[in-house]
Amino acid sequence: MPPQRKHRDFGWLLIVCAGLLPLVLGILCTAIEARHTVYQQQISTANSLLAQAEKMSDSAWNMITQLRQYHYQPCSAIEDKLQRAGNLNAYFRSIGKLEGENVTCSSAYGLNPGTLSEMIMRQPPVTGKAWWSISISGTSGVPDRPAVIFVRQLPDGEGFWAVIDGQYLMDFMQAIGESRGYRMSIRFNEGAAITYGPREQRPETYLKSEAWAAQSSRYPISVEVIVPPSELLKAWRQALFIFLPMAAIFSILLMVLTANWLRRRISWRDEIRRAMRNRQFSVHYQPVYSVAQQRCAGAEALLRWQLPNGDTIRPDIFISAAEEEGMIVPLTRHLLELMAEDIQSWNVQPGFHIGLNVAAEHLQHPEFVNDIQLFARRVKDKQVQITLELTERSLIHDGEDVARKLRLLQSQGMKVAIDDFGTGHCSLSYLQTFPLDYLKIDRGFINAIERLDGETPVLDAIINLSHKLQLEVLGEGVETWLQFQYLHQRGVVFIQGYYYAYPMDNDRLRAWLNEQGPRPLLAEERHEPELHHS
């Protein structure tokens, strides 16, 4: 598959994944949120049920406390009072009095004899306490409806009891859980479960029932609330309904951002390759003036990119893109090929300097020396002086290895310069690490020149430092006679800038060298704002 097709397919896949990401995360987050919402509802429901059961328990124990006034009184004397108390108070199915295990008085059964076990249809629990309560599946009078019995036994063998009808609890569970399809159960002291809700839950392959159990801190009461899968699904749908519009917006936004990022990343790489293949790149050369020789002593190679429609792309843009996309080495090799072709058409004196910028990535590339040596062999017959310009803004790792490569190339007759000296963060370290022949002073320092007898401390310090290190100095961006004279007075040997010549393509450079390049810069011409604009 062609690289462009691979990149295109990969790009579409990445865009689709970017669009799906908010949706997938939204589904996961809403599922978690739905479970959390249902969980909170379960807690609230369980707490409400516990509160109601505790309220009923409080009423039962209050009733038993009231019944203690009938202690030592015969049942015949209190029968009417028991019936009246049981009817006037909510929740109670019956209340009564005990003597040991025998039921002696009852608001529901009157004076009929019977035992506690017969009434609750099970053995009383063994708690070791004088008071206890337990939920039961029914009583002898109402065997098919659950209830809760509360018993208080006194030291003399007598006791009192109260039975709360479980229907009150079932009605309460229906009120709080019917709309959500909850299945709820409540137990008093590990007794029979009083339940309400659907017994069979509809199976769901992707959701399961969730149960929540809680205990009362005041009484031996436990409750369980079971949420059906349908309720989880309902909560999930509600969360999705709220979240999906936002997820769709984020999805579209992320797809657009991803597409733009891919367009910049993939298109730059492909466009640079396509431009090299279609020879859209060309080299412009900016002449360098030698004060000592008073003529053009060389030129700096500057890569330019012109589109088929005539538009140009700024060097700072495509150079940065090439560095980011890992294309700077192929682009530099392409520059060397173009330069080799141009130089073959030159008619210059031996030693004519040709400077080219080399990127940090290329300097550290294993084939850097071979690339430069191949270029040198191609232009050998022209006897040009190759100058490798290190961009001072670039951070070069493994400096010793790079220095070794530069020394090797220097031994073969090449020169090394630092471009834009003083603008980066590693100027002094470069002076210590690399074998240098030239310093190129950045135009920003030269623009600070205001008069011949003035002072520019940083510029003067750079010039003095270069002299002490026995390095040649080239001033970049010289645009006025004043700047030229200032640098000339301070021993700057080479001048480059619009004051001398603009960058020009290969054809114009050859014509300019034939017509004006070798001619000295005349004294009277130095008073003009600009000398040569061609």
Image (cartoon, rainbow, N blue to C red):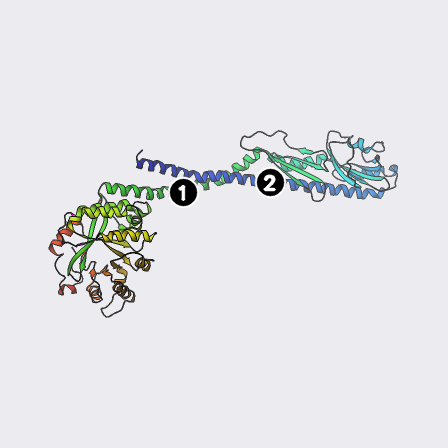
Task: Assign the N terminus to one quadrant of the image.
Answer: top left
* Percent coordinates x, y for residue 328 in the rendering: 29, 47
Residue 67: which numbered mark, if any?
none
Find disc 1 in the rendering and name its residue: 254
Can residue 306 be seen by looking at this rendering? no
- Please identify the quarter of the rendering in which residue 185 is found: top right
Depth check: give the residue in front, 341 or 130: 341
* Percent coordinates x, y for residue 373 in the rendering: 23, 47
SS for callout 1: helix
Q: CA distance from mark 1 to mark 2?
A: 35 Å
SS for callout 2: helix
Question: Is residue 433 on the magenta stretch?
Answer: no
Residue positioned 83% across, 38% down in the render: 97
- Please identify the quarter of the rendering in which residue 123 is found: top right
Q: Is residue 433 left or right of residue 521?
A: right
Q: Disc 1 residue type?
A: Leu
Question: Is residue 347 on the magenta stretch?
Answer: yes
* Percent coordinates x, y for residue 526 in the rendering: 16, 64
Task: Assign the C terminus to one quadrant of the image.
Answer: bottom left
Q: Which residues are magenta?
A: 344-352
Residue positioned 30% across, 43% down in the render: 269
- Please identify the quarter of the rendering in which residue 160 is found: top right
Q: In the image as oriented, which residue stretches furthest toward the bottom?
A: 453
Find disc 2 in the rendering and name its residue: 41
Depth check: give the residue in front, 474 or 406: 406
Residue positioned 32% across, 45% down in the render: 326
Q: Could you classify mark 1 by the number of other residues whose Cα lies within 10 Å: few (under 14), some (14-19), or many (20 or more)?
A: many
What secondary structure do most residues of the magenta stretch adopt?
Answer: loop
Mark in front: 1 vs 2: 1
